[in-house]
Image (tube, grey):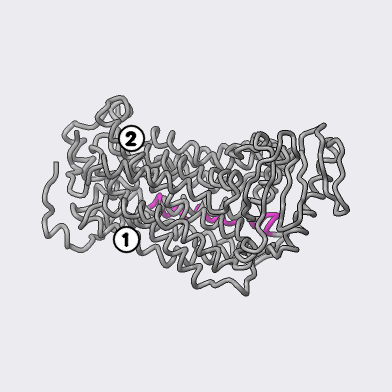
């Protein structure tokens, strides 16, 4: 049911109570991003503190589990807290979520390391990440629902878009705190105990958030529904066991959120991965360029959120998806041109070819860190991908040890599997012997040296030359990517809220949001890496977000209806 917005409601200034609602709701999202960037920025220190005492394979698996845990359990948090939010209210539910989230972050700062309590340290860390992921699963849906239900009709896009801007604040806050800690103490002191300070400071954010949220009132839409006795007693059943609503949940996921997630991850995270891992730009310089692009692009969250109140949510989100599909390849090629022109030149003058038996080449998708890729083909390809070197593929007869040709130089690969024939280049011609667990390490070192020497001779840069980086152009291209993010993400909170009736809104909107962002988006770096490793094209990883965004565009255009004029006070 739609209704016309009153002119007074649409143009009146934001009240003090509404500002408080937006500020209190946004603090939870700041927490989310603050911790996300903390864990990412300090992952090396955290691994050293909590995973140093276990064997390398277990340490790697623990580290991946700790990172992925927050993403994996978010949909379950959406179910748990969404159900509570639809039954007992928005205010108290997302008061609980921020307490769990904030305390989980703080406890990391006081958690004893592996040296103090052994294997319990990484296990407790993963449990804390799981708790935080559960809380985050309920936090975003609660914040978006709470703000939208306080917003006057005709202003929901504007009000909820402020929540979307907090990623930038979380990023800058984490960078500021980490930088302040690093410059105020020695590297040894920071690695020993100083890394804990950013986690401990989060208690201040938690205290402010809880204090403000305790003073807030329940959302008007939920209060009205509760007074009329129309609230849901079984929101999970009503959301997912009844086809009319389940159909809307699926449309929200596949016709909106999946595409939004991959565009968002590509613009803010894969772009950073591409700069640092593929183009070998210095990490600090890359982070600063991403931060500058975020700073320039962030106002567009509110611009597009506000615009969606006038022209609709769907046209803006769909436009962002189609622009991403059409321009990702030229944009990322432009980033290569301006960030590492020496790599572009080397690709043109000394192309790299991998010759291998296709049957021993794996698709190196490894989201949980349990698979090992030990064939000579996999080793050759992953070595090139880690160095950011594109290559073409050439088939070889069955049983042939893979080799890499750089210009006119051929470097044989090796197999890391025990008791296999391995060809190793030691710089004085190839030698053949049976590989054992002991000599696989030596074979790897020889292979790496041979490949490194050949790439150096062909003028492939080991790192991007800071003197040749056109920072202004790189930031400009990164800003375009961020603007695409703002197009798909700025209006989506309002649209998801408007797609579902009040009685099951919290539950219904939270699940597709966190499946889309936690799984479709969370798997983007791993999937894109695997695609690049399989094809040799450093840009081929972009096919993952492009295909998902294109599919979302088609489904969204055909089946998702506009929502800006929906009456969100409707209970059924």
Q: Quick one: which residue is furthest to the front in this view?
A: 397
Position above or below: 364 against 171: above
- Say which mark, if any, is on residue 250: 2
Secondary structure predominantly adopted by residues drawn in magenta: helix
The residue under the point 77% across, 38% down is 416
Up-down relation of residue 330 to residue 256 (above or below): below
Does the magenta run of residues contain 208?
Answer: yes
The percent coordinates of residue 454 (x first, y second) are: 76, 58
Image location (x, y in percent) of residue 401: 75, 40
Quadrant assignment, res 554: top left
Q: Quadrant of residue 372?
A: top right
How far across and down, in percent of the image, does residue 16 sit?
26, 60
Residue identified by numbered label 1:
302
Q: Evaluate if marks 2 and 1 touch, with contact meaning CB atoms under 8 Å apart.
A: no
At label 2, counting other C-alpha atoms closer than 10 Å, the crowd grade (few under 14, some 14-19, many 20 or more) is some
Report the Cα–Cα distance between label 2 and label 1. Answer: 27 Å
Q: Which mark is residue 532?
A: none
Q: Which residues are magenta?
A: 190-211
Quarter containing the C terminus: top left
Q: Residues within 10 Å of mark 1 (few under 14, many from 20)?
A: many
Residue 8 position in % (x across, y down): 12, 60
Q: Is residue 143 magenta?
A: no
The residue nearer to you, when weighing 44 against 117, is 44
Q: Nearer the viewer, mark 2 or mark 1?
A: 2
- Lateral position of residue 179 relative to residue 267, left or right: right
Nearer to us in this view, 184 or 512: 512
């Amino acid at each position: 049911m739609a209704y016309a917005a009153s002119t007074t409601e649409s143009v009146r200034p934001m009240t003090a109570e509404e500002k408080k609602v937006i500020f209190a709701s946004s603090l939870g999202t700041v927490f989310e991003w603050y911790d996300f960037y903390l864990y990412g920025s300090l992952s090396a220190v955290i691994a050293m503190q909590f995973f140093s005492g276990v064997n390398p394979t277990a340490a790697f698996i623990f580290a991946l589990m700790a990172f992925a845990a927050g993403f994996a359990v978010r949909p379950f948090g959406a179910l748990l807290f969404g159900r509570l939010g639809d039954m007992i209210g928005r205010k108290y539910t997302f008061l609980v979520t921020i307490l769990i989230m904030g305390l989980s972050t703080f406890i990391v700062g006081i958690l004893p390391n592996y040296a103090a309590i052994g294997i319990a340290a990484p296990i407790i860390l993963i449990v804390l990440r799981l708790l935080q992921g559960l809380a985050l699963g309920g936090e975003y849906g609660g914040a978006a629902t709470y703000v939208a239900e306080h917003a006057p009709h005709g202003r929901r896009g504007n009000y909820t878009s402020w929540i979307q801007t907090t990623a930038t604040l979380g990023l800058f806050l984490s960078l500021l705190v980490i930088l302040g800690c690093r410059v105020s103490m020695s590297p040894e002191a920071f690695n020993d105990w100083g890394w804990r300070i950013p986690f401990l400071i989060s208690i201040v954010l938690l205290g402010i958030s809880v204090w403000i949220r305790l003073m807030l009132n329940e959302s008007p839409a939920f209060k009205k529904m509760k007074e009329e006795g129309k609230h849901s007693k079984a929101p999970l059943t009503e959301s997912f066991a009844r086809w009319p609503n389940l159909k809307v949940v699926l449309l929200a996921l596949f016709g909106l959120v999946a595409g939004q997630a991959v565009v968002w991850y590509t613009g803010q995270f894969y772009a950073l991965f591409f700069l640092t891992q593929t183009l070998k730009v210095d990490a600090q310089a890359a982070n600063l360029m991403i931060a500058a692009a975020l700073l320039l692009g962030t106002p567009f969250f509110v611009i597009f959120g506000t615009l969606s109140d006038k022209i609709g949510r769907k046209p803006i989100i769909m436009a962002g998806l189609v622009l991403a599909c059409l321009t990702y390849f030229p944009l990322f090629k432009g980033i290569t041109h301006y960030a590492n022109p020496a790599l572009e030149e080397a690709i043109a003058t000394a192309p790299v070819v991998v010759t291998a038996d296709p049957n021993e080449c794996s698709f190196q998708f490894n989201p949980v860190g349990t698979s090992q890729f030990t064939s000579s083909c996999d080793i050759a390809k992953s070595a090139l991908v880690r160095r950011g070197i594109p290559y073409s593929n050439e088939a070889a007869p069955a049983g042939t040890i893979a080799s890499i040709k750089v210009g006119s130089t051929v470097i044989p690969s090796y197999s890391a599997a025990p008791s296999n024939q391995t060809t190793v280049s030691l710089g004085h011609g190839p030698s053949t012997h049976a590989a054992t667990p002991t000599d696989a390490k030596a074979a790897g070192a020889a292979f790496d040296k041979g490949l490194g020497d050949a790439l150096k001779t062909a003028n492939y840069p080991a790192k991007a030359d800071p003197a040749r980086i056109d920072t202004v152009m790189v930031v400009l291209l990164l800003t375009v990517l961020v603007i695409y993010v703002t197009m798909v993400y700025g209006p989506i909170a309002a649209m998801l809220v408007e797609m579902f009736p009040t009685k099951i809104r919290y539950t219904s909107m939270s699940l597709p949001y966190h499946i889309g962002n936690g799984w479709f988006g969370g798997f983007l770096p791993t999937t894109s890496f695997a695609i690049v490793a399989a094809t040799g094209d450093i840009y081929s990883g972009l096919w993952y977000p492009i295909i998902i965004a294109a599919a979302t565009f088609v489904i969204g255009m055909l089946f998702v209806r506009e929502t800006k004029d929906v009456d969100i006070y409707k209970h059924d």
